[in-house]
Image: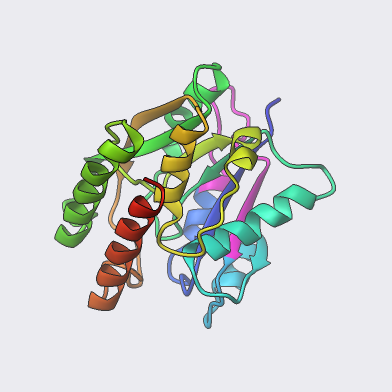
Amino acid sequence: MTKISLVIPARDEEQCIEAVVRGFVNAQDPRGTPWLDEVVVGDNGSLDATAARARAAGATVVHEPRPGYGSACLAALAYLRTRPQGPPAVVVFADGDGSNDPQDLGVLLEPLLKGYADFVIGARSRPEDRSAMSFPQRFGNRLACTLMRPVAHVAYQDLGPYRAIRWSALERLGMCDPNYGWTVEMQLKAVKAGLRVREVLVRNHARIGGQSKVSGTVKGVVGAGYKIIFTILRYR
């Protein structure tokens, strides 16, 4: 059986995280076997009950006080790298707000499990709720993908956070971005490393509670946009 682990970076997501973790912990393949061997929540300095609720739902919680989406992901990966049973064969990344659907795990993992991809991105072209992405998010996403074309020489559809990658491939990338540049860094480095990249359509739901750290504030939108564009130019 292929060992597959899920990483969820989260900060102050007490309204969402328990339902999100339970959804992924209970997700099963067509044979009725759980898809995931472990769900790891990178608690990014939460001041609420995020860690306790994630743990109660069945997740392993790794604390990372340094702010940043990428910092939380890196802390979770450091744990997976050194856990007693060894790292997984595949790592899935998802957000902690309920926007990514556990029922799409099969779609996301199929190219990896069948051996024709090393890295799969869930393209959010199937919005299940019109409020799932704000206008600044949609515009910024489209702009970033357009700017990446001459850099990566590939027409990405999305910077979606719902993604899966082989552990061996991820280790080759040397991921390091501590915040909003994480998804772009992974996609640009994947091309430069010669990984077989696929995009698959996944559902995209509105967050189930709380406020987005990016689209919920002007500061978040501007900060994320600046860092994404900076990262694209850095790796050109």
Q: Position of residue 137 (x, y in %)?
A: 22, 57
Q: How many marks?
A: 0
Task: Judge whether residue 205 can be spotted in this image.
Answer: yes
Residue toward you, 50 or 44: 44
Q: Is residue 10 positioned above or below 67 on the image?
A: above
Residue toward you, 143 or 30: 143
Q: Position of residue 234 (x, y in %)?
A: 39, 54
Q: Is residue 15 positioned above or below 125 on the image?
A: below
Residue toward you, 178 or 43: 178
Query: In the picture, residue 15 is in which quadrant?
Result: bottom left
Instruction: State whether the magenta stretch is mostly helix, strand or loop.
Output: loop
Apparent side of residue 62 relative to residue 143 in the rendered image (left or right):
right
Q: Position of residue 163 (x, y in %)?
A: 45, 41
Q: Residue furthest bottom?
A: 47
Name the residue at 53% across, 39% down: 27
Screen quadrant of the C terminus? top left
Apparent side of residue 223 relative to residue 119 in the rendered image (left or right):
left
Task: Judge whether residue 59 can be spotted in this image.
Answer: no
Name the residue at 38% across, 56% down: 231
Screen quadrant of the N terminus? top right
Residue toward you, 119 or 227: 227
Q: Which residues are magenta?
A: 24-42
Magenta span has 197?
no
Name the residue at 30% across, 72% down: 220
Q: Position of residue 183 (x, y in %)?
A: 42, 50
